[in-house]
Image (cartoon, grey):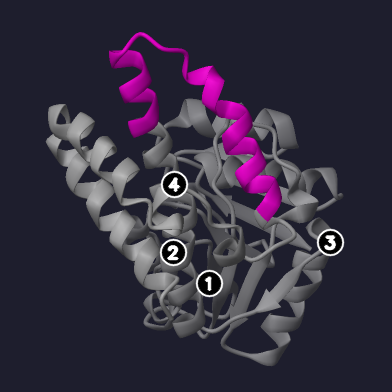
Amino acid sequence: MKITLIGAGNVGYHLGKRLFKKGINIRQVYSRQLINAQFLARKIKAVPVSKFSAIDSKSDLYIIAVKDDAIETVAKVLSRHKGMKRKLIVHTSGAASSEILAKYFLNFGIFYPLQSFSKTRKIRFSNIPICVHASHSKGLKKLNNLGNLISNRVATINDKERAILHVAAVIVNNFTNHLFHLGQHITNEEQLEFDLLKPLIEETVLKIAKYSPLEMQTGPARRNDEKTIKKHLKYLKKFPKYQHLYTLLTKSIQDAHRR
């Protein structure tokens, strides 16, 4: 299979490297910034391009790995290229519908690696779920085969299911990471070491790998320890926004355990 990768950001970078490692021929890498296309292209022996006009129609699969609000712009421009209408075109977004591509191509789909990516972090790609969807069975088979090549878990998930999954992903990833930031801000303000909390963070993640988060819930809210909750809220008066968030989360935990 010959692939053109459109986007050299966090997702494109890791996906391109993984596909190359598994022997996939990535012919071209596109990025608006030529230096970014060149950086990735050197690692995966591809041709870097920074103009849409330089993207040819010789690949079997085109993977659009750009920001959600740029997907349709990319699709619209690509659709004007000779021979592209019948090519298999996919995007890697968790939130954007595949119908964005339906306006421009006969064969389209989704190839969504469910993970948070950063160029500076090494990723164990074999553990990342790959969510796929396609407009036709032939395209779906290709995407399943490609997914199974780079990961141990591939799931066929439609647009509605993927959108719901993305909401849950934001909660468990982006929101929890923000809470880590708030905890770090408090320790920094009080000249305490945030590193003292890292074993607790690690243990929390390790527990939910085997057990239900609901079952593993601990803390004053879970115990209905009103004395400790009031003490915490009194301290958090110096951080009014955090105090409000603490109150909301405390009530959410208590409500969850009243069911």
Q: Residues within 10 Å of mark 1 (few under 14, many from 20)?
A: many
| Kind of residue at badge 3 | Leu
User: Reading the chain from its start, which is encountered first: label 1 or label 2?
Assistant: 2
Q: Which residue is mark 1?
A: 84
Q: Secondary structure at mark 4?
A: helix
Q: Secondary structure at mark 2?
A: helix
Figure quadrant of the C terminus:
bottom left
| Kind of residue at badge 1 | Met
Is residue 170 shown above or below 155? above
| Kind of residue at badge 2 | Leu
User: Reading the chain from its start, which is encountered first: label 3 or label 1?
Assistant: 1
User: Which mark is on residue 149?
Assistant: 3
Is residue 81 shown above or below 45? below
Q: Are marks 1 and 2 in contact (CB under 8 Å)?
A: yes
Q: Position of residue 246 (x, y in %)?
A: 27, 47
Q: Secondary structure at mark 1?
A: loop
| Kind of residue at badge 4 | Thr
Q: Which marked residue is nearer to the observer: mark 2 or mark 3?
A: 3
Q: Residues within 10 Å of mark 2 (few under 14, many from 20)?
A: many
Q: Give the residues in magenta.
A: 182-207
Tell me how far mark 3 sits from mark 1, CA to CA.
Answer: 25 Å
- Where residue 46 sits, quadrant-wise, is top right
User: Reading the chain from its start, which is encountered first: label 2 or label 3?
Assistant: 2
20 sits to left or right of 119: right
Main SS of the magenta segment?
A: helix
Residue 94 visible:
no
Q: Which residue is mark 4?
A: 176
Tell me how far mark 1 sits from mark 4, CA to CA.
Answer: 41 Å
Return the residue nearer the eye: 63 or 216: 216
Return the residue nearer the eye: 214 or 82: 214
In percent of the image, x 18 and y 34: which residue is there? 234
Q: Which residue is mark 2?
A: 78
